[in-house]
Image (cartoon, helix red, strand yellow):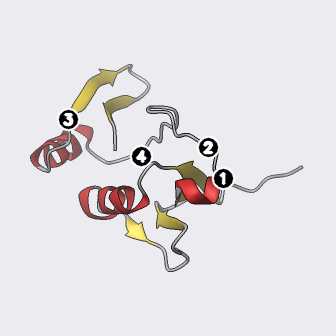
Amino acid sequence: MDAERVDFIGVPVQDLKRADEFYGTTLGLERSRHSSSRWVEYETGNVTIALISPEAMGPDFQVKPHSMPIALRVADVEEAKRKLEAAGIEFRETIDSGVCHIADFSD
């Protein structure tokens, strides 16, 4: 198989309305016109994040906290962190490994 790229990543969420508000309003991601009542898609440049409602996953599915990390690249991690903190986002930790600079938070 010669995969060209990743088109989308499906992320199950506990509360689709709350997740839609967080990813769209708080993070400011661009909402796709392909969204529906069972999932909401956000464009991030090279990959689509598809937030999926619990109902779409089936009756026995349970979302586990911190089980689906997503890394969003930004030009300035500290600036993005300041803006998100001003919006009420709490960060768990900030790491600069020399390879990548990470500011870790939950949706």
- Give the number of the mark in front: 4 or 2: 2
29 or 107: nearer the viewer: 107
Question: Residue at the location (37% across, 63% down)?
Answer: 17
Q: Position of residue 32 (x, y in %)?
A: 48, 74
* Residues marked 1 and 3 touching at CB (< 8 Å): no
- Distance between the Cα atoms at labels 4 and 2? 26 Å
- In the displayed structure image, the side of residue 23 where residue 83 appears, left or right: left
Q: Residue 79: x percent and y percent?
A: 18, 44
Point out the tag, 1 or 4, that comes first from the N-terminus. Answer: 1
Q: Residue at x 38, y 21 (%)?
A: 98
Q: Give me the C-alpha separation between circle 3 and circle 2.
A: 27 Å
- Alpha carbon of mark 2 to alpha carbon of mark 1: how far? 6 Å
N-term mark: 3 or 2: 2
Residue hosting label 1: 58
Camera-side mark, 3 or 2: 2
Is label 1 in a helix, a strand or a loop? loop
The residue carrying pointer 3 sits among few (fewer than 14), some (14 to 19) or many (20 or more) residues within 10 Å by Cα, namely: some
Residue that carries the numbered disc 3 in the rendered image: 90
Whether pointer 2 and pointer 1 mark residues with C-beta atoms closer than 8 Å, the reply is yes
Kind of residue sitting beneath label 3: Glu
Q: Is residue 47 visible?
A: no
Give the amino acid type for the residue marked by disc 1 in the picture: Gly
Q: Is disc 1 in contact with disc 4, using a CB cutoff of under 8 Å?
A: no
In terms of image quadrants, where is residue 71?
top left
* Residue 54 visible here: yes
- Identify the residue at image location x=20%, y=35%: 90
- Say which residue label 4 marks: 72
Identify the residue at image location x=10%, y=47%: 86
Residue type at mark 4: give it.
Leu
